[in-house]
Amino acid sequence: MTDLLGNDLNLQYELLGPEIALVITAALVLFADAFRRELKIGQSAIPAISILGLVVALLLSLLWIDENKDFARLVTIDNFTTFFRVLFIAVTVVVIIGSHEYIERRVSHLGEFYSLLLLSTVGAMLMAGARDLLTAYLAIEVMSFSLYILVSLAKSDTRSGEASLKYVLLGGVASAMLLYGLSFLYGVGGSTQYTEIAAALSDGTSTLELPLLLGLALIIAGLGFKASAVPFHMWTPDAYEGAPIPITAYLSATSKAATFALLLRWFAGPLLPAIDSWQWMISVLAVLTMVIGNLVALQQSNIKRLLAYSSIGQVGFMLMAIVTISDQTGSALLLHLSGYIITNLAVFMGVIAFYNRTGREEIVAFRGLAQTNPYLALVITAGLFSLAGMPLLAGFLTKFILFQSVVSGGYTWLVVTALLASTVSLYYYLQVIRQMYMYQPEGDASRWRLSPTGYLATGAMLVGVVWVGVYAAPFYTAADRAIAPLFT
Amino acid sequence: MDSVGVVIAFYVLSAITIVSAASIFLLRNLVHAIVLLVVVFLGMAGLFLTLSADFIAVAQILIYAGAISVLFVFAVMLTPLASRDNGNSLYAGPGLLLGGAIAAIVVVTAFDVEWNQLTGVALEQRSFTDTIEVIGNQLLGPHVLAFEVASVLLLFALLGAIVLVTDPNNEDGTTAEEEAGKDTAVGGSE
Amino acid sequence: MTVDLAHYLAVSGIIFGIGVAIALSKRNVVAVLMGIELMLNASNLAFLAFSRFSGAFQDGTEPLAGHTFVVFVLTVAAAEAAVALAMAVLIYRRRETVDLDRISVLRW
């Protein structure tokens, strides 16, 4: 097929194999759930189908390693896209395995839950691959809409509905701001294609600096919301607290990574020529985010809220890489992002296993966990230490490489702030660890075990945390190869 | 765009739209605000027509003035005991300030900047006489993926809206039993 | 007397500002949503104004990409209204209120 100018459009649908596979799986899951009695299948068939679909999507995305193609000039399939596709699929698989027990018990509308989870993964994958503003906008909305609904699905928890209402309202405002910014970008750049915008911005936009600045401010506000950067973070603690815990884990991993994928695509691509207009905005955002995120985390008493603020703090570190954008910081960011996701999932899988047993999520509830379940305490401790940046764990190495690349990008003062913020974060992570190891358990102190899938998910993440910390070479190479197409 | 008719239409429609939008902020009765919202949508459709966007104008009337405003009315009707008050929250001050600031910045930018825009003959040439054909071609050609993604989005938004308002307690037996059985786990935290 | 890009952008900016003010300062969920719809509408006006007037386009069809964009914004706006209003009804059922100042088990 050709477009109106007669340019050939490459409508190779197999390029979108993973996305198509996931949408089909989402539909299958819905049908399977609706006709569960007629088909005589159990509840656990639904996560099984989802995982099967995800594995198929994973294999399909591995087909395109080292290719550089585009689908109808709308989606690029290069190593960057493949990297994020694999990352998002892996996150969804881990979340499903680690939490199907939780989901069966505490989530209303099982089939819809899994299919929306798959759909939001599709949105995230398209965000990473898009090379056209319209496609990117719709991808953002697909991911956000699924998350709005997923947040509200916690059963018999009044916080859930309230959290999702706040999320959808603030999310709507943020999307509208982003859209208004995009309209300016479209007007100034004269196209919805990234490549055309980059070309238009690099040759003489001198008279249009002001509208471009305005558009950038609106775009950064909108994306800052999605990434939960201060001062656009107000929804984060509420959504994290009100959502079912698997969705909290998912929000902190996929939703964040997808936003950073989009930020990298935009700020290393179409917006790179305008770097002088946005560099200072992002650096202000980065400082605010890491300082406020880490300071407010100090006063939290709920583990989900604590992790929400800690993840806000982490966003600040990641934004530094956008400030000094280059292939070096870009690959450091990808490495840190994957390390952070593995670490965060380790903590969340631990918290989910804990919640399945106790139904509690206050930090004091973790008292004496080292005695009642030493393995789980070890997993959570390893995760928290990794988040704080302790040596031998994923967080230390990836943070070190990230900070180093930002210093060589010439922003030493940012890194100094980040180091201070990082030190503060150690304090509140230690608070949780202290509860687990230094106190006697309250009441029932008998030992308990995790479910088999609980062991599988937490074990895999624990291995991941140590593996990235000790032998990160494969991840480093992958990040390097993934970032390369953006800077050619 | 020299035709006097278009200029007059622009000013009249803008005045109607802006005044109605501002009244939504000021009016204290929510139902009146919804009526004014419809007026804003219609005014916008008129403005779209002056930009030769005929298809979008019609779609705007059908979707916004027709469907979305009905949704709003439904939402008000389905929450009978809630207040019909369109009052301000605790954040009214900052909100008004931010809105005003954005509006002022955009207006100043709009008139201050030397826009790279078409004039005279070039503007006449871009008259958009057949927008529907081009939009249709774009939907199935250069923007085919957006078309497909949007269809998935709509399907799942529909699904989501249904899921949200379905009370799990009134569903089939299994869900209700689970609800009753598993509540103890949460309650046991005391 | 002519009307050009600046005039349309000014109108869209004013509507957008009013939308922001409504969305951030109203107590009622339905009113907040009205603000969001106004913001989306203002964006649409900006898109259409740019596609009518902007001289930045390289070729003949790009201007209408703005129109296509607006078609999808209309779609998303409808979906958003449906989801958010469903959520408002859900909250109302549990709390008998759609007043954001009173929906506050969670701190903002």
Image (spheres, helix red, strand yellow):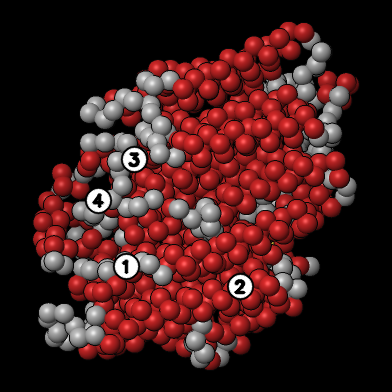
The reply to whether dot 4 and dot 1 touch (C-beta < 8 Å) is no
Mark 4, secondary structure of its residue: helix
Measuring 62% from the left and 37% from the top, which residue is drawn there?
Answer: B102
Q: Position of residue A193 (x, y in %)?
A: 72, 48
Q: Is residue A173 above or below residue B10?
A: below
Measuring 27% from the left and 68% from the top, which residue is drawn there?
Answer: A361
* Horizontal relation, residue B85 to residue A466: left or right: left
The residues tagged by marks 4 and 3 sit, at their Cα atoms, a distance apart of 16 Å
Task: Please tell me how crowded label 3 is: few (under 14), some (14-19), or many (20+) other residues with Cα within 10 Å.
Answer: some
The reply to whether dot 2 and dot 3 touch (C-beta < 8 Å) is no
Residue A131 lies in what quarter of the image?
bottom right
* Horizontal relation, residue A51 to residue A337: left or right: left
Q: Is residue A106 above or below residue C73?
A: below
Query: Which mark is on residue A158?
Result: 4
**Tag 3 residue:** C101
* Horizontal relation, residue A67 to residue A389: left or right: right
Measuring 66% from the left and 62% from the top, which residue is drawn there?
Answer: A283
Q: Position of residue A265 (x, y in %)?
A: 67, 60
The residues tagged by marks 2 and 3 sit, at their Cα atoms, a distance apart of 36 Å
